[in-house]
Image (cartoon, rainbow, N blue to C red):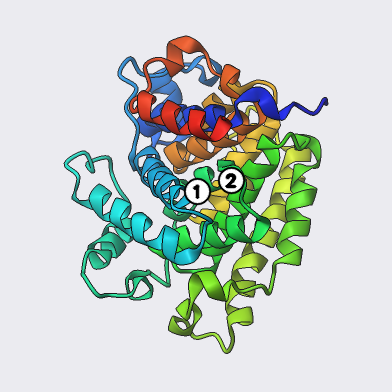
Amino acid sequence: MTTTTVSKRAATGALIGLALGDALGFPTEFNDVPSILAKCGPWREMELPKRAFVSDDTQMTLALGRALRTALGRGALVPKRLERPLREEFVDWYRSPENNRAPGNTCLTACNLLEADGRVWQEASQIGSKGCGANMRVAPIGLAPGLSDEQRAGAAQLQSALTHGHPTALAASDLTAHAVHLLARGADPAGLVGRLRSYACDNRTRYHHTWLGDLWTRSHDPSPEHFIARGWDECLEILGRLQEAVRTVSPEADPCLATGAGWIAEEAFATGLLCFLLFPDEPVTALRRAACSSGDSDSIACLTGAFAGAWLGADAWPAQWADRIEYRDELLALGELWDA
């Protein structure tokens, strides 16, 4: 497969793709595959709803994107510079009347706690939760230009930690942002899982003290290295399953049977990536496969869209779909800023 160029408007492609996946999968969430087929017809012909509403997945991606834009507008990305606008954006989302799209309990609980003045964010973090809300929203950090590897990893883990503090949520968010970054830079999908496994091994015991502070002390782990290694070990296990699935799974089968239903962070990452890797040059088919799945279909398809759009760019998506996606103007504005 040929490596694509970086001038493909990867940020726009990824942001529009994740919103399209979200809107396609939102009506099928909580349904099993036979019910989806009965409602939507053959999965390869699934159509975007006429009113292409998104879920909290896209809303929180935009909240993170705005916070990241604010932080980068103030200088180099450092924890304090990101934490404040991120906290403000998450609380604004929590208070918004548009926050009526089946948001996750972890996000609601944590954002309610983040609202309190004077409370350090680590006290709001839900240390036991590794729900997919941690990484469904992380794509902007993989797309923003000019970040070092350390900034990208630290920021990806911090944005997770404000709500989902489980080490697997942190590691899966870091891994998701890294995958989006590699694809946006033209990495060949055929070698992607191997590169991600190497990345996970290299970072297995690296705790980002500057970004996470004393978060680890809220767990029962004896050291920060032990804490974060638990998360990377679960990600390495799912990457092994993903590598096997890419070789053996039938595209006609429910992808959740191979890599999990996606309610938790590492499974959402793996199943979203599996759907992309089954159809790396057919982005709409990849979205349809992700949306016609028995698990957390909007989050799975959201991640599939981010991966496919980062790889193929803005032209991946049919104009008649992209033109009617909810929050289109804001998604385009962020994409154009980072593609420039």
Looking at the image, residue 70 lies above or below residue 231: above
Q: Residue at x 60, y 30 (%)?
A: 10
Nearer mark to the viewer, of 1 and 2: 2
Residue 101 x %, y %: 27, 40
Instruction: Decide which of 234, 74 is in the foreground and name it.
Output: 74
Q: Amino acid at mark 1?
A: Val
Which residue is at 71% across, 37% downward? 185
- For the residue carrying disc 1, how many other residues have a C-alpha within 10 Å: few (<14), some (14-19), or many (20+)? many
Q: Amino acid at mark 2?
A: Gly
Q: Is residue 324 visible?
A: yes
Residue that extends furthest to the bottom in the rendered view of this protein:
222
Residue 202 lies left or right of residue 33; in this view the side is right
Compared with 172, 331 (above or below) is above
Image mark count: 2
Label 1 residue SS: loop
Vertical order, 196 against 53 (above or below): below
Does residue 157 appear left or right of residue 175 in this picture? Answer: left
Residue named by callout 1: 138
Query: Which corner quadrant holds the C terminus?
Result: top right
Within the image, what quadrant is residue 307 found in? top right
In the image shown, does 235 or 307 lie closer to the viewer? 307
Reading the image, the residue beneath label 2 is 142
Which class describes the residues within 10 Å of circle 2: few (<14), some (14-19), or many (20+)? many
Picture quadrant where residue 107 is located:
bottom left
Cα distance in 3D space between marks 1 and 2: 7 Å
Task: Using the image, determine if residue 250 lies above or below residue 139.
Answer: above
Residue at 34% of width from left, 22% of height from top?
52
